[in-house]
Amino acid sequence: MFAVLKTGGKQYKVQAGDILRIEKLAADAGETIQFDEILMLGGDAPVVGAPLVDGAAVKAEVIDQIKGEKLIHFVKRRRKHSSKRTKGHRQKLTLIKITEILTSGATKAAPKAAAKAAPKAAPAAAGSDDLTQLTGVGPAAAKKLVEAGLTSFAQIAALSDDDIAGIDAVKVKPEWVAQAKDLAKG
């Protein structure tokens, strides 16, 4: 039995036990990943998807994160221009081994993309306020304030000049204290 799967903008015909080099996935060596974009299942009774086969999946184990071979692009302009340029590139790849082909009953669990994920916001603690309402406090400064133990407007409003000087994580501005007093009231 074989399957045709789609990943990284390319299509691969795979069987159990095959080893593939595919576009980089965000997975560590030894992890099991599942591909849900199955275009065709082949064997005794072939099934062609429209465009995908429902419920089908391919499970694979990540062997390693590797780099492809070096590609060199050399440009030479002739005659009056007489210029040369050499550029090189090595594509990042993931080496995987196909473990099994599921024809039906697969759960939807798409592989993680290699793109950089947006940083997750810190979970709001009980009784905390949205510190980004203060003028000049963005997500990064709010995170540093939370790490320094300041999670509410009342805590910032109660800071004295000595307390402000003792905070090393972020420079607390006097305007923040005044705004926090107003926001803590109402």
Image (spheres, helix red, strand yellow):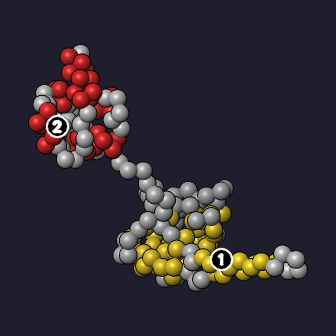
Looking at marks 2 and 1 on the same chain, the residue that comes earlier in the sequence is marked by 1
Q: Which mark is residue 87?
A: 1
Give the residue at x 12% y 31%: 160
Quick one: quadrant of the N terminus? bottom right
Give the residue at x 59% y 83%: 70
Q: Is residue 146 left or right of residue 37?
A: left
Query: Residue 1: in sight, yes or no?
Result: no
* In the image, residue 129 above or below residue 60: above
The crowding category of the residue bearing disc 2, from other C-alpha atoms within 10 Å (few below 14, some 14 to 19, many at least 20), is some
Query: Residue 72: in sight, yes or no?
Result: yes
- Nearer to us in this view, 141 or 115: 141
Give the residue at x 22% y 47%: 169
Spatial CA span between label 2 and label 1: 52 Å
* Label 1 element class: strand
Q: Which mark is residue 164?
A: 2
Q: Is residue 49 left or right of residue 172?
A: right
* In the image, residue 132 above or below residue 13: above
The crowding category of the residue bearing disc 1, from other C-alpha atoms within 10 Å (few below 14, some 14 to 19, many at least 20), is few
